[in-house]
Amino acid sequence: MNSSPHYAAEVPEEHEADHSSVSLAVSTVILALRHKKNSARPSLWLPLVRRLREPYKGQWALPGGPLQSQQSLEQAAGYTLKRATGLEPGYLEQLYAFGDVLRAPEARAARINGTPVPAPGADHERVVSVVYWASIPATEVSQTRVHENIRWFPVDELPELAFDHNEIVEYALYRLQNKVEYSRIAHSFLGDEFTLAQLREVYEAILGRPLDPANFRRQIAASKSIIDTGRRIEGTRHRPPRLYRYNTAQAYADAGPLGMYRERRES
Amino acid sequence: MNSSPHYAAEVPEEHEADHSSVSLAVSTVILALRHKKNSARPSLWLPLVRRLREPYKGQWALPGGPLQSQQSLEQAAGYTLKRATGLEPGYLEQLYAFGDVLRAPEARAARINGTPVPAPGADHERVVSVVYWASIPATEVSQTRVHENIRWFPVDELPELAFDHNEIVEYALYRLQNKVEYSRIAHSFLGDEFTLAQLREVYEAILGRPLDPANFRRQIAASKSIIDTGRRIEGTRHRPPRLYRYNTAQAYADAGPLGMYRERRES
DNA sequence: ACAAAAGTGTTGGTACTACACCCATGG
DNA sequence: CCATGGGTGTAGTACCAACACTTTTGT
């Protein structure tokens, strides 16, 4: 399913009309765990790119770009991620395709003020954006690319973003919160080996609330999603925690139509 | 969020490259309850359109068409639905955007045979398809448009469809099964008023298994998603069942970024 | 009276929450 | 020894599946 596009079958008597001056862009909500200053617990951060032209010139926006004719959507999202961070994704999933007719600034103003939406003119370019979300393993976050026009922000301290990107980020976080409860994406925020406490910190950062360590342990154990490596971390000033690995034999729930493919990459 | 597209913010030093010869199509998996011959219980059916040109000429495919430059994706899906059935949707939701580079027939053959995928040539058109799924209220199914090149099929007796449409339908059904358990889409397959038995039949058709009437009743009652109208249906040869209505005050879970908009339409 | 489906009660199991408590290590 | 987090035990609760049972109609 993931490897083929498809063409629509039109109902015969309808004629086809303009084969669209619509252009296609791909953006990515890139999430990773980072530490705020003076904070013991990690939280979710994402990189944003400063816009160099109108509209919204000077404001921060999700990294993205037009779809090249030889790229799949997923490849385009991965390339966007690479440009913004220099890294490969730990996980990559399609969020939603946004494609309304109205130019963003006008529509947004109309939405906020409650004023009627302006009539669509022929004077603006029509863009459909396919948005992905991705995670980066904590072990690689330190290697992220540094650039004057790229900056990481904690998701709960975002500035006002260009277009409707604030709402897109909110939706990405909402989807992530739902998904973390019945799939194993949390692992994609960590390296190959990790302690239960680290895994719990991922859940806590995503859900935004503390979890009972005792119950968390049992829940994860019951899911059989992780395997005890037998080794421990020493040098802590308390009992040394065990190190675990993903159980790659375990299947994901709802990885989307691309599920099987992603399963392989994850392992 | 639903009312504005957005443009990507490129990382500055990258240049833009070709502004894409990619064209955009919208297809819709349209689902409704119908009765098979000699079957007491309704099952899920969907309308397909016969292809009149290559590739896959003569085979059945999901209804769809190119995105017009003045249509939103959702409008395009609704229009597709109207063309195929003559009806308005009871519910409409984006499924997924499919957009790999390779032309469908080649990629599909490669996928099935395990042979290496052919190199993408410049000789074919690149299409990205945004697929929606929709439901039609049972009360309106009888009014569906009749056309030589449109035919309804039970979802468990589909022929071999064009492109990867079989897999798309499977994915749509999978999403529907998940969603029916934590949202109220089941209602969109019925008219304004319905009995509990009818609602249960919707669940059973979607989930593909019988449900305990006693437990079903309590579950639905606990969710507070329906309201007793006080009236009953008479003329049955058993105890007359109550008629219920949707509780429109109740919020949906996970209606996607377009949630609030859909909420209003549903009521 | 009987068939059929509406609707109620009851019981046992599972899974989650809260929290008490013990364990192992570094300082 | 103490502080700190790792890790286990357990009681209370909420929910759910299974199924026995009662109710209300048409024939």
Image (cartoon, coloured by chain):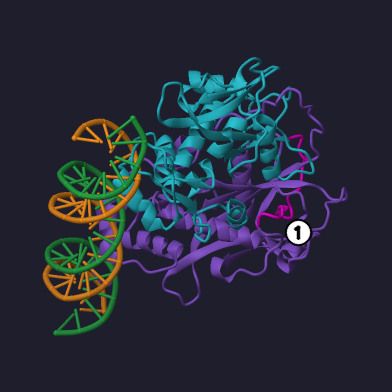
Chain colours: A cyan, B purple, C green, D orange
Stretch of the chain drawn in magenta: A1-22
Residue located 50% across and 63% down the image? B44
Location of mark 1 (residue): B107
- Circle 1 sits in a helix, a strand or a loop, which is it? helix
Of B113 and A233, the residue lying toward us? A233
Whole-percent x and y of residue B41?
42, 70
Residue furthest right as drawn = B123
Residue located 38% across and 44% down the image? A240
Of A259 and B264, the residue lying toward us? A259
Q: Residues within 10 Å of mark 1 (few under 14, many from 20)?
A: many
Whole-percent x and y of residue A63?
64, 29
Of B216 and A262, the residue lying toward us? A262
Q: Is residue A206 above or below residue B31?
A: above
Residue B243 visible in this rendered orientation of the protein: no
Q: Which amino acid does label 1 sit on?
A: Ala
Q: Is residue B188 left or right of residue B14?
A: left
User: Is residue B98 rendered magenta in the image?
Assistant: no
Residue furthest top as drawn = A58
Residue A218 visible in this rendered orientation of the protein: yes
User: Is residue A13 rendered magenta in the image?
Assistant: yes
Q: In which quarter of the image is the C terminus of chain B?
A: top left
Of B222 and A25, the residue lying toward us? A25
Quadrant assignment, res C11? bottom left
Magenta span: predominant SS is: loop
Q: Is residue A159 above or below residue A248?
A: above
